[in-house]
Image (spheres, rainbow, N blue to C red):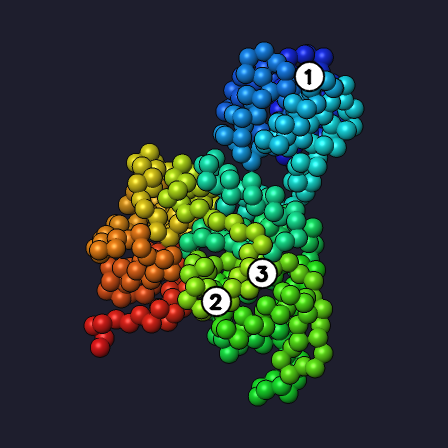
Amino acid sequence: MTNKRVILVVDDDPGILDVMEARLASAGLAPVRAACAEEGLGIMRERHVDLVVSDVKMPGMGGEGLLNAVREQYPHVPVILLTAYGTIPDAVALTRSGAADYLTKPFDGKELVRRVRELLPAESLEGEDGCAEIRKLLWGGNSPAMLRFQQLLERVARTSVNVLLVGESGTGKELAARLLHRLSTRRNGPFVVVDCGSTPSTLLESELFGHVKGSFTHAIKDKKGLIAEADQGTLFLDEIGNISPEMQTRLLRFLQEGTIRPVGGVRDEHVDCRVVAATNADLRALVRQGTFREDLYYRIKVVTLVAPPLRERREDIPLLAERFLERACREQGREALRLAPETLDRLAAHDWPGNVRELRHAVEAGAVFATGDAVRPGDLQLEEALPARDAGADGPGSLSLEENERETIVRALRHTQWNKTAAADILGISRRAIHYKINKYGLHDPEAD
């Protein structure tokens, strides 16, 4: 059984409410009715709503007041306005200020359903997009920062433009990329991941573009590149800030012309794929330094989405933690656990330098070590906050995103006496990732000298 999308209908005319309720219910949606804007807002505070259909002229705050409140408190929820013929200019003005659409009274029931379906992702209406688990792990609450990110992502997903995902390590950029793919028109095509951060530059060209037999030593047969594998789908370039100048040039040519040439090949091949790139580096700083091509930067950032760090969405921590715990118990084959109140307090107070990934690892550890029916603070194995960095004359605000990352990694390594595995656990990243970062920044243990 699939979950029906909830449509809040607001009108002071019971007859109009009856018509809308019947039409939407017959279309497989779940209408919820309210007789005024104030009642509608009360409903939205108590339950999830996917879309609002509201009359404009009503007693009290009316449709315009409701629109403003929804825009402020629930920016991801579209609002369709109902208006009398004589007040169409008012509806147009409200549409320009944030309403998703408007209908004139009397309206056709089929047209109402059509407009609603246009504003809701069709795949989500039927619950068959396979995104439920991704949404649970990525959104995890109603913080303004994450709701804004969700609203923008789901809007961009329906287009074909290239997207640059920016955010700290552990914020869920790959999950966001997968959601972009599954909500797009290319959902039936492949989703191909290229880890630019861990693939040596000497191999990345062959990995991306493929090669022909005999083009270099050990090229014993033709190999199809990952870009070609992504044809009709989505190519996800993770940690794109780490690719070499030579690879930047080749990638730019592909983005401009839509063709690739395998290593050692003589013919160009056409590839039609959407490119989603991700980075935790400050690409603008790299452009200024001359290490990242400006023309490539603007090619990949047609739209930029910034994944908020967990410290900016602390109100989401309890729900995320509960979902991670439910999943951990299921995967570990143990009885359901709960998070003790003092554990929730501990989670809320932690700084989470490793973001959502660190939270997931902490909760998974809690599921392993918990005794009884609850996870206690000690079960989480959270490290205490690392010592604060001494502020220099310029202060911490002068550091770029990349410099901040380097400082954070150095502090974690010092805190663990250069135990790379322990440092990776503190940061909430993989051992492979921390080895890459150590090599990237040229870090070494001074005690080993």
Q: Amino acid at mark 2?
A: Phe
Secondary structure at badge 2 equals: loop
Q: Are marks 2 and 3 in contact (CB under 8 Å)?
A: no
Q: Considering only order in the chain, which callout, 3 or 1, is on the residue closer to the N terminus? A: 1
For disc 1, the neighbor class at 10 Å (few under 14, some 14 to 19, many from 20) is many
Task: Kindly report the distance in space between the C-alpha atoms of the residues bearing marks 2 and 1.
Answer: 57 Å
Residue position marked by numbered label 2 in the rendering: 292
Would you name the residue on which mark 1 appears? 17
Q: CA distance from mark 2 to mark 3?
A: 12 Å
Q: Tell me what residue is drawn at x 22 percent, y 55 percent.
A: 393
Q: Earlier in the sequence, mark 2 or mark 1?
A: 1
Residue 310 location, quadrant = top left
> Which residue type carries mark 1?
Leu
Which three-letter amino acid code belongs to the residue tagged 3? Answer: Arg
Image marks 2 and 1: residues in contact by CB distance under 8 Å:
no
Q: Which residue is mark 3?
A: 299
Q: Is residue 262 left or right of residue 370?
A: right
Give the Cα distance between marks 1 and 3: 48 Å
Where in the figure is residue 52, as x and y percent of width and height? 62, 27
> Mark 1 falls on what kind of element?
helix
